[in-house]
Image (tube, rainbow, N blue to C red):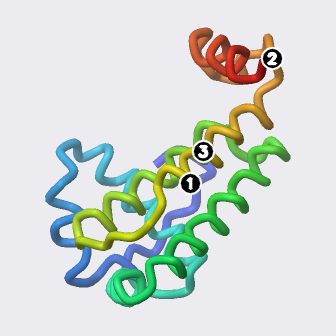
Amino acid sequence: MPPGRKPRDLSLLNGEATKLFLEAIRSPVTCEVYKRRLVAFLEYAEMDVDTFVVEAKKNPRWAENLILSYLLKEKEKAVRREIEPSTVGNVKKPVKLLLEMNDVSGINWKKISHILLNTLKTCVPIGISNNFSSITVKLVELIHF
Protein backbone atom coordinates (compact mmCIF):
# COMPACT_ATOMS: atom_id res chain seq x y z
CA MET A 1 0.00 0.00 0.00
CA PRO A 2 1.40 3.42 -0.94
CA PRO A 3 2.47 5.66 1.94
CA GLY A 4 -0.19 8.00 3.25
CA ARG A 5 -3.09 5.77 2.21
CA LYS A 6 -5.19 4.52 5.08
CA PRO A 7 -6.06 0.82 5.09
CA ARG A 8 -9.71 0.00 4.42
CA ASP A 9 -11.84 -2.36 6.45
CA LEU A 10 -12.58 -5.15 3.97
CA SER A 11 -15.26 -6.73 6.16
CA LEU A 12 -17.94 -5.08 3.98
CA LEU A 13 -16.90 -7.53 1.26
CA ASN A 14 -17.72 -10.60 3.35
CA GLY A 15 -20.63 -12.24 1.59
CA GLU A 16 -21.87 -14.44 -1.18
CA ALA A 17 -21.91 -11.61 -3.74
CA THR A 18 -18.13 -11.30 -3.73
CA LYS A 19 -17.34 -14.90 -4.67
CA LEU A 20 -17.85 -14.61 -8.43
CA PHE A 21 -16.62 -11.01 -8.37
CA LEU A 22 -13.24 -12.12 -7.01
CA GLU A 23 -13.08 -15.13 -9.35
CA ALA A 24 -13.51 -12.82 -12.34
CA ILE A 25 -10.34 -10.87 -11.54
CA ARG A 26 -7.12 -12.45 -12.80
CA SER A 27 -4.41 -10.18 -11.44
CA PRO A 28 -3.72 -10.11 -7.69
CA VAL A 29 -2.80 -6.42 -7.95
CA THR A 30 -6.07 -5.60 -9.72
CA CYS A 31 -7.93 -7.66 -7.14
CA GLU A 32 -6.54 -5.56 -4.28
CA VAL A 33 -7.31 -2.29 -6.06
CA TYR A 34 -10.85 -3.41 -6.94
CA LYS A 35 -11.52 -4.54 -3.37
CA ARG A 36 -10.30 -1.22 -1.97
CA ARG A 37 -12.40 0.80 -4.42
CA LEU A 38 -15.47 -1.36 -3.89
CA VAL A 39 -15.19 -0.96 -0.11
CA ALA A 40 -14.99 2.83 -0.56
CA PHE A 41 -18.22 2.69 -2.57
CA LEU A 42 -19.94 0.43 -0.02
CA GLU A 43 -18.88 2.77 2.79
CA TYR A 44 -20.51 5.61 0.84
CA ALA A 45 -23.64 3.47 0.38
CA GLU A 46 -23.53 2.52 4.09
CA MET A 47 -24.21 -1.16 3.42
CA ASP A 48 -22.42 -4.46 2.99
CA VAL A 49 -21.94 -6.13 -0.37
CA ASP A 50 -24.81 -8.64 -0.11
CA THR A 51 -27.31 -5.97 0.94
CA PHE A 52 -26.25 -3.72 -1.93
CA VAL A 53 -26.58 -6.51 -4.52
CA VAL A 54 -30.01 -7.60 -3.21
CA GLU A 55 -31.28 -4.01 -3.28
CA ALA A 56 -29.80 -3.44 -6.75
CA LYS A 57 -31.62 -6.51 -8.07
CA LYS A 58 -34.89 -5.28 -6.58
CA ASN A 59 -34.47 -1.70 -7.76
CA PRO A 60 -31.85 -1.12 -10.48
CA ARG A 61 -32.86 2.54 -10.82
CA TRP A 62 -32.02 3.11 -7.14
CA ALA A 63 -28.62 1.43 -7.66
CA GLU A 64 -27.94 3.51 -10.77
CA ASN A 65 -28.74 6.72 -8.88
CA LEU A 66 -26.51 5.66 -5.99
CA ILE A 67 -23.63 4.89 -8.37
CA LEU A 68 -24.11 8.21 -10.17
CA SER A 69 -24.24 10.07 -6.87
CA TYR A 70 -20.98 8.46 -5.77
CA LEU A 71 -19.26 9.12 -9.09
CA LEU A 72 -20.38 12.76 -9.06
CA LYS A 73 -18.91 13.10 -5.56
CA GLU A 74 -15.66 11.64 -6.88
CA LYS A 75 -15.84 13.97 -9.88
CA GLU A 76 -16.01 16.94 -7.50
CA LYS A 77 -12.83 15.66 -5.83
CA ALA A 78 -11.17 15.57 -9.25
CA VAL A 79 -12.29 19.12 -10.02
CA ARG A 80 -10.75 20.24 -6.70
CA ARG A 81 -7.59 18.28 -7.67
CA GLU A 82 -7.86 16.01 -4.62
CA ILE A 83 -7.72 12.97 -6.93
CA GLU A 84 -6.67 12.45 -10.53
CA PRO A 85 -9.52 12.63 -13.08
CA SER A 86 -8.68 9.13 -14.33
CA THR A 87 -9.45 7.77 -10.85
CA VAL A 88 -13.12 8.67 -11.26
CA GLY A 89 -13.48 6.30 -14.22
CA ASN A 90 -11.62 3.57 -12.40
CA VAL A 91 -14.04 3.77 -9.48
CA LYS A 92 -16.86 2.52 -11.71
CA LYS A 93 -15.09 -0.67 -12.80
CA PRO A 94 -15.33 -2.76 -9.61
CA VAL A 95 -18.95 -1.74 -8.98
CA LYS A 96 -19.90 -2.68 -12.53
CA LEU A 97 -18.05 -6.00 -12.30
CA LEU A 98 -19.73 -6.82 -8.98
CA LEU A 99 -23.19 -6.21 -10.42
CA GLU A 100 -22.46 -8.07 -13.66
CA MET A 101 -21.13 -11.11 -11.77
CA ASN A 102 -24.33 -11.14 -9.69
CA ASP A 103 -26.67 -10.85 -12.70
CA VAL A 104 -27.94 -7.38 -11.83
CA SER A 105 -29.41 -5.80 -14.95
CA GLY A 106 -31.23 -2.59 -15.73
CA ILE A 107 -28.42 -0.15 -14.97
CA ASN A 108 -27.65 2.29 -17.77
CA TRP A 109 -23.85 1.98 -17.89
CA LYS A 110 -23.77 3.97 -21.12
CA LYS A 111 -25.25 7.01 -19.35
CA ILE A 112 -22.76 6.59 -16.51
CA SER A 113 -19.89 6.39 -19.01
CA HIS A 114 -21.04 9.60 -20.71
CA ILE A 115 -20.98 11.39 -17.38
CA LEU A 116 -17.49 10.05 -16.69
CA LEU A 117 -16.28 11.19 -20.10
CA ASN A 118 -17.51 14.63 -19.15
CA THR A 119 -15.20 14.42 -16.12
CA LEU A 120 -12.18 14.40 -18.41
CA LYS A 121 -13.45 17.47 -20.25
CA THR A 122 -14.12 19.29 -16.98
CA CYS A 123 -10.89 18.44 -15.17
CA VAL A 124 -8.08 18.33 -17.71
CA PRO A 125 -6.78 21.69 -18.92
CA ILE A 126 -6.04 21.46 -22.61
CA GLY A 127 -2.31 21.19 -23.27
CA ILE A 128 -1.42 20.07 -19.73
CA SER A 129 -1.07 16.36 -19.17
CA ASN A 130 -1.78 16.09 -15.40
CA ASN A 131 -0.30 12.58 -15.49
CA PHE A 132 -2.32 11.66 -18.58
CA SER A 133 -0.59 10.29 -21.61
CA SER A 134 -0.26 12.68 -24.52
CA ILE A 135 -2.72 10.52 -26.45
CA THR A 136 -5.36 10.98 -23.74
CA VAL A 137 -4.78 14.73 -23.75
CA LYS A 138 -5.22 14.78 -27.54
CA LEU A 139 -8.44 12.78 -27.24
CA VAL A 140 -9.74 15.25 -24.68
CA GLU A 141 -8.82 18.09 -27.04
CA LEU A 142 -10.77 16.41 -29.86
CA ILE A 143 -13.77 15.81 -27.65
CA HIS A 144 -13.61 19.33 -26.29
CA PHE A 145 -14.02 20.92 -29.75
Q: In this figure, which residue is indicated by the disc labeled 2?
A: 126
Q: Please tell me how crowded label 1 is: few (under 14), some (14-19), or many (20+) other residues with Cα within 10 Å.
A: some
Instruction: Name the residue at 54% across, 81% down.
Output: 62
- For the C terminus, the image quarter is top right
Q: Position of residue 59 (x, y in %)?
A: 45, 85
Q: Are marks 2 and 1 in contact (CB under 8 Å)?
A: no
Q: Position of residue 23 (x, y in %)?
A: 14, 59
Q: Amino acid at mark 3?
A: His
Instruction: Name the residue at 65% across, 11% down.
Output: 138
Give the alpha-carbon distance from disc 1 to disc 3, as whole Å.
5 Å
Q: In this figure, which residue is indicated by the disc labeled 3?
A: 114
Q: Are marks 1 and 3 in contact (CB under 8 Å)?
A: yes
Q: Secondary structure at mark 2?
A: loop
Q: Please tell me how crowded label 3 is: few (under 14), some (14-19), or many (20+) other residues with Cα within 10 Å.
A: few
Q: Amino acid at mark 1?
A: Ile
Mark closest to the chain's N terminus, 2 or 1: 1
- Frontmost of labels 2 and 1 is 1
**Residue 16 lies in quadrant:** bottom left
> In the displayed structure, does residue 141 sit left or right of residue 98?
right
Res 74 label: none
- Frontmost of labels 3 and 2 is 3
Q: Position of residue 57 (x, y in %)?
A: 34, 83
**Residue 54 lies in quadrant:** bottom left
Q: Position of residue 131 (x, y in %)?
A: 65, 22
Q: In this figure, which residue is indicated by the disc labeled 1?
A: 112
